Amino acid sequence: MLIVGGGGREHALAWKLAQSPSCEALFAAPGNAGTAQLGQNLDVRDTDIDGICQAAERERIDLVVVGPEAPLAAGLVDALGERGIAAFGPSRAAARLESSKWFAKSIMQRAGVAHARGELFESPAPAHKWLEMLGPDDLPVLKADGLAAGKGVIVPDHIDDAHAAVDDLFGGRYGSAGERVVIEDRLAGMEASAMAIVSGADVLPLPLSCDYKRIMNGDQGPNTGGMGVYAPPGFVPPDTDVFESIHGRVLRQMADDGCEFRGVLYAGLMVDDGAANVLEFNVRFGDPETQALMPLIEGDLLPVLAASARGEPLPSDAIVNSGRATVSVAVVSGGYPGSYETGHVIDGLDAVDTDVTVFHAGTALDDDGRVVTAGGRVLAVTAVADTLEAARGIAYDNVRRISFEDSFFRTDIALREVTR
Ligand code: AMP
Ligand code: GLY
């Protein structure tokens, strides 16, 4: 098996899949110091489509699991399929649910899925004009239509900032992702991530979870790739039907349009009073949600991903939600998401409890074989317990045993659930 990507999500997938009795050899491209402990890292970038295809042929890989969105949007699954190699993830055409926000909206519109309503703009003047028509208390959300590495969304605090965002987006700040701009209604509520493994019309829900995007406690400061996650969210009714009312409807609409979906369909939800609206779709496992969920799920994930990759019915009893609670805390380099140093030795990795899992994101091995920092987000420390309060206590107790120069973590992951 080959896992494409080199972040915390990919280490978490490698950790789970390596436990499968059917996992013979495990490769990661490019991987990190965590995946290197479980298999072999290949020196190929995740967006190097030819390089991945060649490596998969050379190593006689029977299943490729694609982590990040960029290779999916660039057609990696299609390219592997042309060579007869099964790959878990959507085709390039189906990946438009993430790579074009407007495509996703038009599918939701036709499928009757509750979502943030919006308009598409292809030049600045009509967008400015549209903003001028808004009421004094109406603030919208502005999004680059294309992939912008998680940075193309602007939630302005003042209408002047919305106008400035229009100029930024069309001014090329987000490259070709900003050639088209979506302006949509701003929704209030609490956010949750609803991921499901999909094979055509078959949907296998994963536990709902919540990630923390801002760098500082209390959701202050700039957005990051994710500072921590917990599950389950107490504000979503346990009997929620989002997987039918959102995933099921979208998948049927995609199939009707001749664009069958395989892989992970991840709906980013805004939940208000138990009712969910979709903010966005991702077509892959969430990062850092995967680092929180893999230790929560019991059973063998590999046959599920293999069935999805082949478009076969999913073995729905292969994995089950243990029903416990999980808290995962990201440890990042000081300065992140701005500039930060790398190459600092990480101490204390062997001091964590045996039932706590430390997933690597930006890590590498130095010439002496020591684990050193190599990115902004460095580690995710995940604890599973019977209650969120217990999982949170164990996670933070263990986070404090790990250290490197200038390390930083939020101290309020899951706090809102245990103080309610
Ligand atoms: P996205 O990349 O679409 O998930 O957007 C990043 C973040 O922007 C989300 O996690 C939300 O916090 C916020 N956001 C996006 N769309 C909306 C919306 N329509 N209303 C309110 N907040 C939003
Ligand atoms: N955690 C948000 C994402 O994976 O896009």
Image (tube, rainbow, N blue to C red):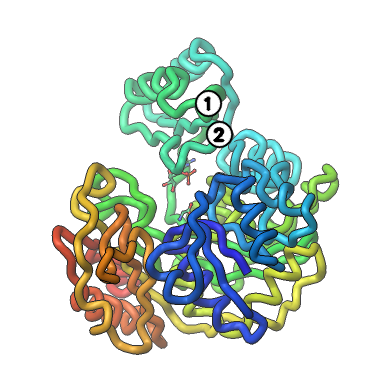
Q: Residue 107, percent across and down?
A: 71, 41
In front of the other: label 1 or label 2? 1
Instruction: Classify 155 as above or below 307.
Output: above
Residue drawn at the location 47% of the way across and 83% of the way down = 324
The N terminus lies in quadrant: bottom right
The residue under label 1 is 176
Q: Residue 49, percent across and down?
A: 62, 46
Label 1 to label 2: alpha-carbon separation: 7 Å
Q: Residue 117, percent across and down?
A: 58, 36
Looking at the rendering, which quadrant does residue 365 occupy? Answer: bottom left
Asked if the residues shown at circle 1 and circle 2 are in contact, with their CB atoms under 8 angstroms apart, the answer is: yes
The residue under label 2 is 146
Instruction: Classify 58 as above or below 167.
Output: below
Q: Residue 192, percent across and down?
A: 48, 59
Residue drawn at the location 21% of the way across and 78% of the way down = 348
Looking at the image, which residue sits at the far left? 405
Left or right, residue 373 beside residue 27: left
> Given the image, on which type of amino acid does mark 1 rest?
Ser
Residue drawn at the location 71% of the way across and 83% of the way down = 317
